[in-house]
Image (cartoon, grey):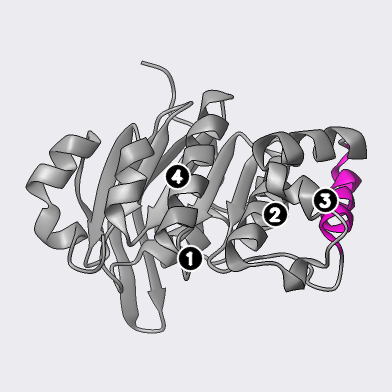
Amino acid sequence: MSVPILEVIDLHAAYGRIEVLRGVDLAVPRGAVMALLGPNGAGKSTLVKVISGQKDPTSGDIHLGGVHVRKASSDELARVGLCTIPEGRSVFPNLTVEENLTLMSYAGVPAPAILETAYSYFPRLHERRHQLAGTMSGGEQQMLAMSRALASDPALLLLDELSMGLAPLIVDELYETVARIAESGVSILCIEQFARTALRVADYAAVMSGGRIVASGEPGEILDTMADVILGGAA
């Protein structure tokens, strides 16, 4: 069995005296899409912050591609292939679509290659390339955020609440693109409150509740056994 692209072992994290992660164990296989599901307050976003170097854990281990990275900073993690698209759209609203994308060439990828990748995944961005990012719809801004992330050529993409505030049809379209990105070899961990759409494109799923992973397996199995937990809200 190959080494997982991401492995989290007995991870704990707290805000003051309140423990939020209570021994999280999670493995994301290489080249797979894993959906991490669970209700509000389960600890999903805190887990993202710890994995991406934005918050220190109190104990436990994190391995990225077999390398121990628990003490690594966000910058160091980005350099070894971890890219996070945080909750909400992370774009520069006063720059055009094309300017947002070409800014990513600082990482050493030629600007034409960045634009080609973005426009191939999201033709709508090509139509909007001269438009200020802040004037686009929420779905289009999320497309731009995903394109900027892809410019860094990630090994592992963390998507935190991709569907936040978006219409169901747009969410379906974005997740179809998630599946295409995965087919190119990028491993993806989708943190999502709305379960059904994420499960349609996921190879594996895990469920968080009370700061722990309480179930993991194939999407159909998770939907059958954990529906009361993961479908507590809109699905």
- What's the amino acid at mark 2? Leu
Picture quarter with the N terminus:
top left
- Which residue carries the number 3 mark? 101
Q: Residue at x 77, y 66 (%)?
A: 133
Q: Do callouts 4 and 3 mark residues in contact (Cβ within 8 Å)?
A: no
- What's the amino acid at mark 3? Leu
Q: Earlier in the sequence, mark 4 or mark 2?
A: 2
- Which residue carries the number 4 mark? 189
- Which residue carries the number 1 mark? 166
- What's the amino acid at mark 4? Leu
Q: What is the distance, in whole Å, between disc 4 and disc 2 at their CAs?
A: 19 Å
From the viewer's perspective, is 11 left or right of 108? Answer: left
Q: Do callouts 2 and 3 mark residues in contact (Cβ within 8 Å)?
A: yes
Element at badge 2?
helix
Q: What is the distance, in whole Å, between disc 2 and disc 3 at their CAs?
A: 8 Å
Element at badge 1?
loop
Q: Do callouts 1 and 4 mark residues in contact (Cβ within 8 Å)?
A: no
Nearer to us of marks 4 and 2 is 2
